[in-house]
């Protein structure tokens, strides 16, 4: 990019770049400052319009004061980093952009912004708070782990195709309102007939940890069946191929998911759990588990799992599922409990290779943009 180009063009160009960011140039801290500044601006917007930009189900898990503290910390960190880099002449264009955004967020109310609560009726909403909190938590935790304990050392944070996966991440989080509405509608329409009260009471009478394990096991058996169908039914495979088309796995890669697959899988899993009558605390815990593990198993993280690798799905186990190596095709379907694949004979065994050599889909005909990937299953070959 031309060094004399306007700052906004250089910032936009940053989001089109790939590859390693070298330390010592001020670029890493500048990116952190810009990242926190953007989230701060979005956070202020969420405070101004909570009824339309935040998730009702998520609001019960945090307080306004806690979010104010988080927003203040982000503004302080971003502003301090940006101002320091500007003073010392390190990537001034990038840090000026971050500082301008911080100033804009503060001018709009900052962490003391007045919360608008007048419009709280039933209406469509965007999950902006879900996007901010999940992006902040996932990127902070998993980028650190990927750098400290990498499965593939040297893999850059801004690896190839990260931009399209970020668009999937953004869409999946902002559309949470419509997705939850669809899921609730179909779950109650399709699975209410299967509810059997004596069985539901028996399940809810189990000790909490036992009930939680049964819920995870049942959910993974349903997901195993659905996942296997995605691979063996040609049309379903075209939907699932969007998820498999990423050629580099990290914490963000699991977000590449077709909206139809998201709906089908969630309706099937949550429908069965609903029909069996698992208690709300257990369902809440399961949702947290599935959210965390979905990011973990796609991440570029290597830990000493030991014998646990034969019980739970680990990143290296799931990496083999995404491999296009011959021995890995249609293997390792489980999402939570790896022993399910061992029981059904679909686990990758005795490859002689520590890690896969190839990733992605064999046809390699997946378009490179978010909208084109959503249209991919329905286009003619």
Image (cartoon, rainbow, N blue to C red):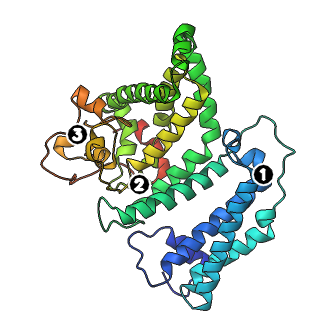
Q: Which residue is mark 3?
A: 329
Circle 1 crowding by C-alpha within 10 Å: few under 14, some 14–19, many from 20: some
Disc ID at residue 368: 2
Q: What is the count of numbered marks?
A: 3
Q: Are the residues at dot 3 and dot 1 in contact (C-beta closer than 8 Å)?
A: no
> Which quarter of the figure is the C terminus placed in?
top left
Side (left or right) of 175 relative to 316: right
Query: First in sequence: mark 1 or mark 2?
Result: 1
Residue 256 in sight: no
For the residue pair 185 and 301, the one nearer the viewer reads as: 301
Label 2 SS? loop
Residue at point 43%, 54% (across, down): 251
Q: Quadrant of residue 200?
A: top right
First in residue order: circle 3 vs circle 2: 3
On screen, 7 above or below 138?
A: below
Residue located 51% across and 24% down the image: 207
In the displayed structure image, the side of residue 136 where residue 339 appears, left or right: left
Give how far across and how far down residue 89 sits, in percent.
57, 91
- For label 3, the crowd category at 10 Å Cα-Cα, with few meaning under 14, some 14 to 19 and many 20 or more, is some
Residue 225, compared with residue 353, is above or below; it is above
Q: Is residue 37 above or below residue 279?
A: below
Q: Nearer the viewer, residue 125 or 308?
A: 308
Query: Quarter-wise, where is residue 222 in the image?
Result: top left
**Which mark identifies residue 49?**
1
Image depth: mark 3 or mark 2 in front:
3
Where is residue 32 shown, x and y percent of the image? 55, 71
Badge 3 marks a residue whose secondary structure is loop
């Amino acid at each position: 990019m031309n060094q004399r180009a306007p700052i906004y063009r250089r910032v936009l160009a940053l989001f089109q770049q790939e590859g390693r960011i070298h330390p010592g140039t001020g670029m890493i801290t500048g990116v952190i400052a810009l990242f926190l500044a953007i989230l701060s601006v979005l956070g202020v917007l969420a405070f101004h319009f909570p009824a339309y930009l935040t998730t009702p189900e998520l609001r019960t898990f945090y307080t306004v004061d806690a979010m104010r503290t988080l927003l203040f910390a982000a503004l302080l960190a971003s502003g301090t980093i940006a101002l320091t880099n500007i003073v010392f002449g390190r990537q001034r264009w990038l840090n000026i952009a971050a500082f301008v955004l911080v100033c804009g967020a503060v001018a709009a109310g900052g962490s003391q912004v007045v919360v608008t609560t007048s419009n709280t009726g039933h209406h469509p909403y965007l999950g902006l708070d879900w996007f901010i909190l999940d992006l902040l938590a996932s990127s902070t935790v998993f980028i650190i782990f990927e750098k400290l304990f990498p499965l593939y050392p040297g893999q850059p944070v801004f690896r190839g195709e990260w931009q399209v996966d970020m668009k999937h991440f953004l869409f999946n989080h902002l559309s949470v309102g419509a997705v939850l509405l669809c899921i609730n509608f179909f779950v109650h329409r399709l699975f209410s007939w299967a509810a059997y009260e004596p069985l539901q009471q028996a399940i809810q009478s189990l000790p909490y940890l036992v009930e939680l394990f049964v819920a995870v096991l049942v959910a993974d058996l349903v997901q195993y069946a659905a996942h296997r169908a995605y691979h063996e039914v040609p049309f379903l495979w075209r939907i699932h191929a969007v998820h498999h088309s990423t050629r580099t796995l990290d914490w963000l890669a699991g977000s590449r998911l077709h909206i139809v697959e998201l709906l089908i899988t969630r309706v099937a899993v949550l429908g069965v759990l609903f029909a069996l009558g698992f208690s709300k605390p257990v369902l809440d815990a399961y949702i947290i588990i599935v959210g965390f593990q979905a990011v973990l198993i796609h991440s570029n993280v290597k830990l000493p799992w030991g014998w646990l690798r034969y019980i739970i799905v680990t990143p290296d186990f799931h990496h083999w599922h995404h491999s296009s190596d011959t021995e890995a095709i249609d293997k390792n379907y489980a999402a939570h409990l790896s022993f399910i694949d061992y029981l059904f004979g679909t686990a990758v065994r005795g490859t002689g290779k520590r890690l896969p050599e190839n990733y992605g889909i064999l046809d390699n005909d997946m378009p490179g943009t978010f909208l084109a990937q959503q249209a991919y299953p329905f286009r003619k070959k």
